[in-house]
Image (cartoon, rainbow, N blue to C red):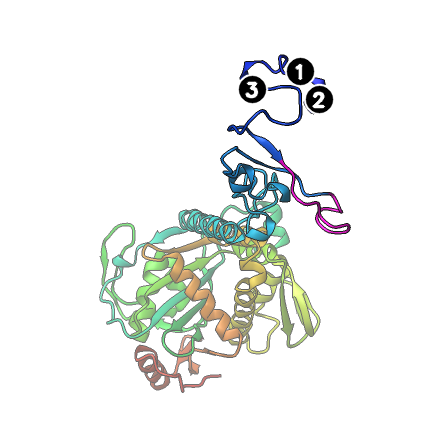
């Protein structure tokens, strides 16, 4: 019987295979690839009991597949060398495992870059909104600067840009020009901040000064008047000059806000919570409040800080209310809920920066330091007080206590803890 596939004959195989007969027995020893069958695997062993597959050898006894290509052939590793999942390689044909370390690094770099770009853009946007209209270089004969920083914070009754309806709703009246409705000195330094109210009825001497517009020198005559008259005569520059001349304290920065700007800031933060110490009803300011803790909107807040005639101490009590409210406002603005929320931060910054008037050297960092210091005052870390008063002057104005004022100024200049107390 012919062992060749499909009973091929010797002639059918052609000369490629050499000569031979159809008989299964080879003619003679020659180099020829033959099939050598190994011993079959016992039942239940090997690959499901399948007999071991043949390996190929040449006539010289040199291994064919067993020595090379057959290495791993019967285990499914046809091409050899390639490791399976257990060798540390992924499944054949699958995606490589994600590189989480690289992904986290790329994401972190992207977020940091975005934060830096946003912060820089916000800084320049906010800086462009500051109205640096006050030139303190025009102030003459200034006292020597001490330790720490002194801000003169002014609330004016400016109605600039307000409609008739707004004037009516805010009970501001329609007076032309602008006057100071409140004045405070905020001292910041290495210790706790100090906020000092300057009653607008304070009796002061108008010193020699240089006109802010004309540049003309006006010699002092010893004329005494109310402090807010200095602002009415020649604006912020003369007000700073008057405060410095009557206290001996160097003013580093000037900040002013008008009626409309004040109300807009309050509304932008959703109102300010404050504890009103007594029932207040004042037809001139529009105030109508019951005693207790409550949240005031912009219109109500303006009425509260402007109330004067309904208070027993008149101007002195009003300055206390102003301090209390401004500290509460700063405390609410300088919170994570506002600073980290762009939907609150940008409207608040826009409303505040548009309405602020500052000196030419005032920067955003200075403004932020001022707000944080006021926040510290409201949190109990600082001191709030009125300028020490000794009584009434002969013209009916409030007379400062000269000795206490001198001591207070010395403590502020040396950035020391304030020990002076006032009413």
Lower sequence index among marks 1 and 2: 2
Mark 1 and mark 2 in contact? Answer it, CB < 8 Å: yes
| Label 1 – label 2 distance at C-alpha | 8 Å
Q: Is residue 222 left or right of residue 166?
A: left
For the residue pair 144 and 40, the one nearer the viewer reads as 40
Magenta region's main secondary structure?
loop
Q: Is residue 208 above or below residue 7?
A: below
Q: Which residues are magenta?
A: 36-50
Q: Position of residue 355 (x, y in %)?
A: 48, 52
Give the residue pinned by disc 2.
Answer: 2
Q: Secondary structure at mark 3?
A: helix
Q: Is residue 406 left or right of residue 118?
A: left
Q: Position of residue 26 (x, y in %)?
A: 60, 26
Mark 3 and mark 1 in contact? Answer it, CB < 8 Å: no
Give the residue pinned by disc 3.
Answer: 17
Indicate whether residue 40 is drawn in magenta. Answer: yes
| Label 3 – label 2 distance at C-alpha | 16 Å
Local crowd size for mark 1, using a 10 Å CA cut-off: few (<14), some (14–19), many (≥20): some
Local crowd size for mark 3, using a 10 Å CA cut-off: few (<14), some (14–19), many (≥20): few
Is residue 271 shown to the viewer in this render?
Answer: yes
Indicate whether residue 419 is drawn in magenta. Answer: no
Residue placed at 46% from the left, 51% from the top? Answer: 109
């Amino acid at each position: 019987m012919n062992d060749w596939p499909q009973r091929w004959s010797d002639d059918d195989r052609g000369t490629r295979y050499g000569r031979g007969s159809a008989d299964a027995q080879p003619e003679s020893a020659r180099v020829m690839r033959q099939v050598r069958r190994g011993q079959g695997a016992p039942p239940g062993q090997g690959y499901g009991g399948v007999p071991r597959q043949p390996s190929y050898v040449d006539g010289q006894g040199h291994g064919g597949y067993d020595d090379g290509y057959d290495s791993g052939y019967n285990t499914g590793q046809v091409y050899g060398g390639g490791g399976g999942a257990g060798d540390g390689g992924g499944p054949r044909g699958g995606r490589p495992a994600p590189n989480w370390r690289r992904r986290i690094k790329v994401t972190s770099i992207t977020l940091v870059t975005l934060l830096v770009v946003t912060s820089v853009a916000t800084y320049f946007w906010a800086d462009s909104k500051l109205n640096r209209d006050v030139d303190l270089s025009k102030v003459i004969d200034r006292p020597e600067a001490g330790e720490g920083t002194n801000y003169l914070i002014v609330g004016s009754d400016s109605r600039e840009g307000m409609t008739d309806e707004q004037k009516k709703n805010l009970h501001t009246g329609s007076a032309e020009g602008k006057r100071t409705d409140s004045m405070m000195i905020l001292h910041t330094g290495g210790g706790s901040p100090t906020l000092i109210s300057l009653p607008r009825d304070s009796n002061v001497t108008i010193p020699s000064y240089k006109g802010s517009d004309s540049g003309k020198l006006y010699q002092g005559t010893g004329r005494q008047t109310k402090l807010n008259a200095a602002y009415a005569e020649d604006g912020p520059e003369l007000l700073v000059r008057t405060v410095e001349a009557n206290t001996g304290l160097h003013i580093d920065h000037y900040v002013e806000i008008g009626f409309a700007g004040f109300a807009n800031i309050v509304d932008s933060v959703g109102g300010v919570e404050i504890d009103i110490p007594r029932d207040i009803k004042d037809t001139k300011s529009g105030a109508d409040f019951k005693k207790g803790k409550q949240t005031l909107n912009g219109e109500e807040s303006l009425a509260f800080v402007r109330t004067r005639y309904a208070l027993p101490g008149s101007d002195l009590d009003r300055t206390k209310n102003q301090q209390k409210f401004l500290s509460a406002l700063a405390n609410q603005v300088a919170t994570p809920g506002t600073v980290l929320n762009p939907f609150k931060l940008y409207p608040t910054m826009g409303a505040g920066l548009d309405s602020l008037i500052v000196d030419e050297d005032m920067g955003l960092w200075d403004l932020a330091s001022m707000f944080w210091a006021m926040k510290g005052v409201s949190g109990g870390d600082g001191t709030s007080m009125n300028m020490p008063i000794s009584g009434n002057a002969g013209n009916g104005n409030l007379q400062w206590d000269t000795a206490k004022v001198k001591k207070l100024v010395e403590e502020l200049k040396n950035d020391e803890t304030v020990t002076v107390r006032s009413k």
